[in-house]
Image (tube, rainbow, N blue to C red):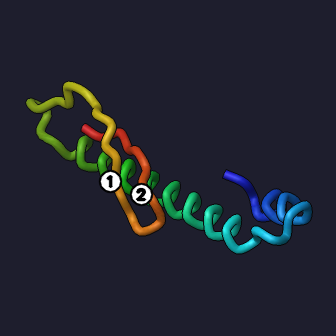
Amino acid sequence: MERIEELAEKLKGNVGTWEEEIFSWACSLAQEAAKALLEGIDEELMKGTEQSLKVECLKEHRIPIISGQFSVMSG
């Protein structure tokens, strides 16, 4: 993900698309935040399972959200 400074520098070359570029950047940020949140919740849930249970594999799940969709690995 680009930093704000990198995004601003990128937009200097083409200010005509600033709105789309900023929207795309914000959606990307929202997707990364949602992914980190959900993966953290999944890890906590796996830690809290009974010792007799185990996760056999992690699967990729595509999750649609308002800002687009992203993939997350979960058990």
**Dot 1: within a 10 Å radius of its alpha carbon, few (fewer than 14), some, or many (20 or more) residues?**
few
Residue 43: where, in percent of width, then height? Answer: 32, 44
Question: Which residue position is annotated with label 1?
Answer: 41
Q: Is residue 13 left or right of residue 19?
A: right
Residue 37 disc label:
2
Q: Quadrant of residue 26?
A: bottom right
Could you tell me which quadrant the C terminus lies in? top left
Residue at 41 percent of width and 68 percent of height: 66
Circle 2 SS class: helix
Which residue is situated farthest in the front direction here? 16
Q: Quadrant of residue 34?
A: bottom left
Quick check: marks 1 and 2 in contact, CB under 8 Å? yes
Amino acid type, callout 2: Leu
Residue 58: where, in percent of width, then height? Answer: 28, 32
Amino acid type, callout 1: Ile
Circle 1 SS class: helix
Q: Marks 1/2: CA distance?
A: 6 Å
Q: Is residue 69 left or right of residue 29?
A: left
Residue 55 higher or lower than 37, as above or below: above
Residue at 12 percent of width and 39 percent of height: 50
